[in-house]
Amino acid sequence: MDWLALLGYLHAPLSVLMLAIFCAIVAWTYAPRRRKDMDDSARIPMRDDR
């Protein structure tokens, strides 16, 4: 079995895996318990650190 045939068999499962990882990252980012961290990070450009 050559590499192209192997990639043909793994294409669908890898696509599903990558979609699941992406959805997990989005869910983790927008979780309610992370709201304070995200708000603090959003204000970084507005800080006056001179």
Image (cartoon, grey):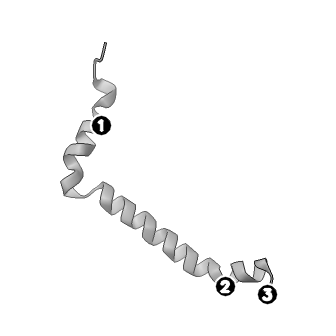
Q: Which mark is residue 9?
A: 2
Upstream in the sequence, badge 1 or badge 3? 3
In this rendering, is residue 39 above or below 4?
above
Identify the element where label 3 is drawn: loop
Amino acid at pointer 2: Tyr
Dot 1 crowding, Cα within 10 Å, few <14, some 14–19, many 20+: few
Q: Say which quarter of the image contains residue 44.
A: top left
Amino acid at pointer 1: Ala
Q: Which mark is residue 1?
A: 3
Identify the element where label 1 is drawn: helix
Between the residue at mark 1 and the residue at mark 2, the CA separation in whole angstroms equals 42 Å
Between the residue at mark 3 and the residue at mark 2, the CA separation in whole angstroms equals 11 Å
Is 46 on the left or on the right of 6, as rendered?
left
Residue, disc 1: 42
Amino acid at pointer 3: Met
Quadrant, the N terminus: bottom right
Q: Say which quarter of the image contains residue 45.
A: top left
